[in-house]
Image (spheres, helix red, strand yellow):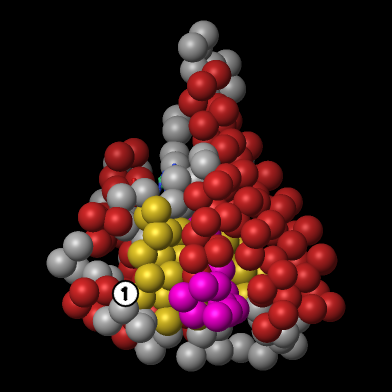
């Protein structure tokens, strides 16, 4: 059993991971912008038990939320060994962006890059102490190649991938293993806003959840750093 911090667990991929992690018997500390979003669901501690789940307010643009969430997790569970970064936003900001869109670019930087970075910073010592710490990061195919014209999103995901590589290097000797998950389109609100493909042709969030949680069963000598997950052929 692991004790897992998951950001962005109100919806989409993060929620699918949290629900499967609960079924698999792990202890969860969930970071969500509005804890009321989980009320009445299986992720509500009132329903599944306060000994299994802790809910925390987490706004990714607010570094003190990251610190408070980590501190509260330690206070509640005594330790944790896994951090899964799912919170993220998509913006269709183009290379030649319009005047006034600077704010969107700054926001995507803060949420998609600085959010995971702050969480890593505050969670690091605890992950290192475990000897088998794991960091799973929802990057994207957009962090590996720029296929279209989405400058801001791709910029943020390439930066996130760079951060993952450095996490891997810094954490290696302490047994921290990092996996950057790089899907194409996943059937969530994020993808439906873009209407990229029929939903049934996209990767399903439950499948990303299975893969993410299977990673946690692997020994330090066997954890893949990067997983590309395509729902369309890319050559
Ligand atoms: N869907 C795809 O096709 C796809 C493909 C590749 C990679 N990804 C990546 O996978 C991750 C999860 O995406 P998804 O598809 O599950 O997206 P989603 O359905 O739109 O869910 C996004 C999650 O992030 C949270 N979030 C957004 N802004 C936040 C903020 N400022 N502070 C804290 N939490 C915030 C949302 O919380 P609220 O409910 O409070 O808004 C929600 O829980 C993202 O990093 C995304 O870039 C997605």
Q: Nearer the viewer, residue 170 or 186?
A: 170
Q: Is residue 107 visible?
A: yes
Q: Where does label 1 land, which residue?
A: 19
Q: Nearer the viewer, residue 234 or 33?
A: 33
List x then y, in percent, for residue 129: 72, 80
Q: Nearer the viewer, residue 185 or 26?
A: 26
**Residue 83, magenta (yes or no):** yes
Label 1: which secondary element? helix
List x then y, in percent, for residue 66: 54, 53
- In the depicted structure, whether residue 101 falls above or below residue 164: above
Stretch in magenta:
74-86
**Residue 61, magenta (yes or no):** no
Q: Nearer the viewer, residue 9 or 97?
A: 9
Say which residue appears at 44% left-offset and 45% top-offset: 59
List x then y, in percent, for residue 4: 49, 75
In the image, farthest residue toward the left: 40
Classify the position of the C terminus by image quarter: bottom right
Label 1 C-beta lies within 8 Å of the nearest ligand 1 atom: no
In the image, farthest residue toward the top: 99
Q: Image quadrant of residue 166? A: bottom right
Q: Is residue 14 visible?
A: no
Say which residue appears at 63% left-offset and 51% top-offset: 118
Say which residue appears at 50% left-offset and 46% top-offset: 60
- In the depicted structure, whether residue 155 falls above or below residue 57: above
Neighbour class for label 1 at 10 Å: few (<14), some, many (≥20)?
some
| Relative to 188, 169 lies left or right | right
Count of residue discs: 1
List x then y, in percent, for residue 6: 46, 65
Say which residue appears at 58% left-offset and 36% top-offset: 109
Q: Image quadrant of residue 9? A: bottom left
């Amino acid at each position: 059993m692991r004790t897992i911090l998951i950001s962005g667990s109100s919806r989409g991929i993060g929620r699918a991971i949290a629900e499967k992690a609960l079924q698999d018997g792990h202890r969860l500390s969930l970071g969500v912008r509005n804890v009321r979003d989980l009320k009445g669901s299986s992720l509500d501690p009132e329903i599944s038990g306060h000994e299994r789940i802790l809910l925390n307010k987490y706004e990714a643009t607010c570094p003190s939320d990251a610190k408070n969430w980590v501190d509260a997790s330690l206070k509640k569970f005594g330790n944790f060994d896994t951090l899964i970064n799912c919170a993220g936003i998509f913006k269709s900001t183009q290379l030649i962006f319009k005047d006034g869109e600077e704010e969107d670019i700054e926001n995507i930087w803060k949420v998609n890059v600085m959010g995971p970075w702050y969480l890593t910073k505050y969670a690091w010592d605890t992950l290192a102490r475990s000897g088998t710490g794991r960091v799973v990061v929802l990057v994207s195919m957009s962090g590996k190649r720029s296929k279209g014209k989405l400058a801001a999103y791709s910029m943020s995901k390439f930066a996130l991938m760079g951060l993952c590589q450095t996490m891997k290097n810094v954490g290696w000797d302490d047994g921290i293993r990092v996996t950057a998950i790089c899907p194409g389109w996943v059937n969530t609100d994020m993808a439906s806003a873009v209407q990229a493909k029929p939903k049934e042709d996209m990767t399903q969030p439950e499948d990303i959840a299975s893969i993410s949680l299977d990673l946690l069963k692997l020994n330090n000598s066997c954890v893949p750093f990067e997983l590309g997950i395509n729902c369309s052929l890319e050559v």
